[in-house]
């Protein structure tokens, strides 16, 4: 069985701001970020035991 994808978005203080589980097989998805202030965030994507981390710049 293929595991779903987990997305977490942290602010630079390490506080979890967004957490979303994406069902396996989804080709695209959206994550509302309009409640977050502009700034730099850390995105963590986990799938099948593998974790990738990247920076995300939120601007209006």
Image (cartoon, grey):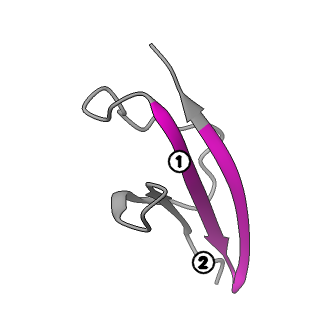
Q: Nearer the viewer, residue 23 or 12?
A: 12
Few, some or many residues within 10 Å of mark 2 (<14, 14–19, 20+): few
53, above or below 34, in the image: below
Q: Main secondary structure of the magenta part?
A: strand
Say which quarter of the image contains residue 38.
Answer: top left
Outermost residue to the left: 35
Region in magenta: 39-56
| Mark seen at residue 3 | 2
Say which quarter of the image contains residue 36.
Answer: top left
Asked if residue 46 is among those painted magenta in the image, a careful observer would answer yes
Circle 1 SS class: strand
Circle 2 SS class: loop
| Mark seen at residue 41 | 1
Q: Is residue 19 left or right of residue 46?
A: left
User: Which of labels 2 and 1 is toward the front?
Assistant: 1
Screen quadrant of the N terminus = bottom right
Question: Residue sitting at 55 percent across and 70 percent down?
Answer: 4
Looking at marks 2 and 1 on the same chain, the residue that comes earlier in the sequence is marked by 2
Residue 6 lies, in percent from the top left, at 52, 67
Question: Residue sitting at 44 percent across and 68 percent down?
Answer: 14
Residue 46 lies, in percent from the top left, at 63, 72
Measure the alpha-carbon separation of dots 2 and 1: 25 Å
Say which quarter of the image contains residue 51.
Answer: bottom right
Q: Is residue 36 left or right of residue 50?
A: left
Q: Is residue 3 left or right of residue 15?
A: right
Q: Nearer the viewer, residue 48 or 10?
A: 10
Residue 18 lies, in percent from the top left, at 36, 54
Question: Residue sitting at 66 percent across and 77 percent down?
Answer: 2
């Amino acid at each position: 069985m293929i595991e779903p994808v987990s997305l977490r978005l942290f602010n630079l203080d390490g506080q979890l701001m967004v957490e979303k589980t994406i069902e396996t097989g989804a080709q695209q998805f959206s994550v509302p970020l309009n409640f977050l202030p502009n700034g730099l965030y850390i995105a963590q994507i986990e799938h099948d035991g593998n974790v990738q981390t990247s920076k995300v710049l939120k601007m209006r």
